[in-house]
Image: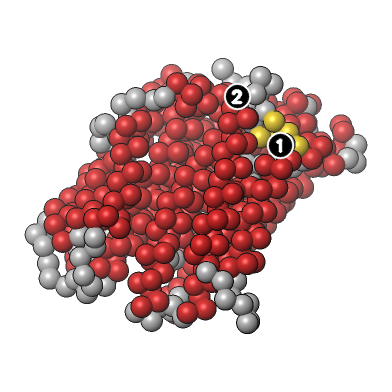
């Protein structure tokens, strides 16, 4: 049963992508093919998440331990499936507009859906694979596929962004590969030359006996490698270009799911490292890079002129928040990180999709050209304005609760100065986001819509992720709370 669900979760999108690809002499509806393939993967993925979250042993496994899903993996599965659902829901409308205006060619529709399904499949493989080497392969595959999606419009800007993303992402995962090899060198002395030497479940069990010097180097390289993929400063320079040039549904997946998947891989290394070395080493690095990410993103949020780049730099900020919480450790901060990953994924996906709708309607990404959108494009404009405020952490946003938990957790763990500095930076970031969001949504309208006003029914689902983020800020369902507590315990790597 578990094996069947795993195969469906990963293989259904891959097979669907092959079917959707525009092969010569074949006429297939790529949109329906993508919907069917993703539905099968979503059902299987949710089944695995439920089984992992409710199993008495704390995890489920398959294929001789190559696949292991624990609550942390189940949480990431939920994030990926939620964001991918939003991206697929927005894709038909996005593609029809781009094809009608000659931005994309007719054959690009099949290529788009095929690559999107392959991207989703590679992301879904990340929380399923227990082997750190195979985990690295899945993340590298997601880089290659998503780079093709970033450059699918073939404009000079898109090609440059895709190339920059591919080069920097490949360099980053190259460092991650070195980290994986160092972890193997540390474990093989204890386990022997076996396939289990890179299994994170075995590594966690023997973490206290691993070579401290090798694991110290492994974590540094993992931080540089997966930190590049996660968009942490100073490895973030690819992110604003790629997110701003990619199709909006792809930007939603990149920001809401792909960045979190990379942070997940880093969290696995961290959980092992804190047992081997104690928390001080990795915590100091994570707190420093988390604060640096928030601080560097802030001026770009304040002085930004491009709507999608604004959202991209916000992703840098929020990945910094999650790295900060991971470094703080402790139950409160780590539960905050777990919930923050879900809420950020939901609201950021909704924001990128709303931004994509507005960019198509106004024919521009410049913030000075987009004003009064809530009156001219009611659903997308309102969703963007509300989402900006929620993303900044204004109550009742669940992001306010997660950021508060992370900061208070930091104070409890003796990181009072870092938590205070982060609080000031986050308050300034909220002001910047709220300023831009209010002007875009409710400022004085400007002329310049290039297409008809968007219908409410066609984009009404944009309010769903915003509503969910606001609702969770008021009430957290008991099953979600239990899952978050289990995830926090895993992220802590044995820390109380």
Q: Give residue 426's position: percent from left, percent from top.
A: 31, 39
- Left or right position of 81 against 222: left
Per the image, label 2 sits on a secondary structure element best described as helix
Quadrant containing the C terminus in the rendered view: top right
Within 10 Å of disc 2 (Cα), the crowding (few <14, some 14-19, many 20+) is some
Label total for image: 2
Q: Find disc 1 in the rendering and name its residue.
A: 2
Q: Is residue 171 above or below residue 267?
A: below
Name the residue located 31 percent from the left edge and 26 percent from the top edge.
Answer: 474
- Tag shown at residue 410: none
Q: Separation of disc 2 and disc 1 at Cα?
A: 14 Å
Q: Where does residue 398 sit, x and y in percent of width and height?
A: 34, 33
User: Observer-nearest residue: 363 or 204?
Assistant: 363
Q: Position of residue 306 (x, y in %)?
A: 29, 64
Q: Which quarter shows the N terminus?
A: top right
**Is residue 202 in view from this perspective?**
yes
- Residue at 52%, 39% in the rendered image: 78
The residue at which mark 2 appears reads as: 54
- First-in-chain label (2 vs 1): 1
């Amino acid at each position: 049963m578990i094996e069947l669900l795993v195969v469906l979760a990963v293989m259904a999108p891959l097979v669907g992508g092959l079917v959707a690809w525009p092969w010569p002499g074949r006429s297939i509806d790529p949109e329906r093919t993508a919907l069917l393939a993703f539905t099968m993967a979503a059902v299987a993925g949710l089944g695995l998440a439920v089984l992992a979250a409710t199993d008495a042993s704390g995890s489920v496994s398959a294929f001789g331990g190559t696949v292991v899903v624990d609550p942390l993996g189940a949480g990431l599965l939920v994030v990926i499936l939620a964001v991918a659902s939003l991206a697929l829901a927005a894709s038909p409308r996005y593609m029809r507009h781009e094809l009608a205006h000659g931005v994309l060619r007719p054959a690009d529709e099949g290529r788009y859906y095929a690559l999107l399904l392959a991207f989703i499949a590679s992301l879904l493989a990340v929380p399923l694979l227990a082997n750190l080497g195979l985990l690295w392969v899945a993340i590298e595959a997601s880089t290659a596929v998503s780079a093709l999606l970033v450059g699918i419009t073939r404009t000079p800007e898109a090609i440059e962004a895709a190339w920059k993303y591919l080069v920097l992402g490949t360099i980053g995962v190259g460092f991650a590969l070195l980290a994986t090899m160092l972890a193997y060198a540390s474990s093989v002395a204890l386990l022997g030359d076996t396939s289990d030497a890179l299994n994170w479940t075995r590594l966690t069990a023997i973490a206290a006996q691993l070579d401290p010097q090798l694991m110290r180097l492994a974590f540094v390289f993992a931080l540089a490698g997966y930190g590049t993929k996660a968009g942490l400063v100073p490895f973030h320079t690819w992110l604003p270009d790629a997110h701003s040039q990619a199709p909006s549904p792809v930007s939603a997946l990149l920001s809401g799911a792909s960045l979190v998947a990379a942070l997940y891989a880093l969290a696995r290394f961290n959980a092992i490292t804190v047992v081997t070395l104690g928390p001080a080493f990795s915590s100091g690095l994570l707190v420093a890079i988390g604060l640096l990410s928030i601080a560097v993103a802030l001026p770009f949020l304040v002085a930004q002129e491009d709507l999608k780049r604004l959202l991209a730099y916000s992703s840098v900020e929020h990945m910094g928040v999650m790295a900060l919480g991971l470094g703080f450790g402790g139950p409160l901060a780590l539960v905050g990180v777990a919930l923050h990953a879900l809420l950020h994924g939901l609201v950021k996906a909704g924001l990128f999709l709303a931004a994509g709708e507005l960019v198509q309607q106004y024919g521009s990404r410049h913030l000075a050209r987009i004003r009064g959108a809530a009156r001219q494009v009611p659903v997308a404009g309102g969703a963007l304005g509300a989402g900006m405020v929620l993303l900044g952490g204004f109550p009742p946003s669940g992001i306010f609760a997660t950021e508060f938990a992370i900061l208070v957790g930091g104070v409890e763990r003796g990181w009072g100065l870092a938590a205070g500095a982060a609080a000031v930076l986050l308050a300034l970031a909220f002001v910047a986001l709220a300023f831009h969001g209010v002007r875009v949504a409710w400022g004085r309208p400007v002329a310049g819509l290039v297409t008809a006003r968007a219908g409410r029914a066609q984009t009404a689902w944009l309010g769903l992720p915003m509503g969910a983020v606001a609702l969770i800020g008021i009430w957290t369902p008991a099953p979600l709370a239990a899952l978050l507590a289990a995830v926090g315990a895993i992220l802590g790597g044995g820390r109380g």
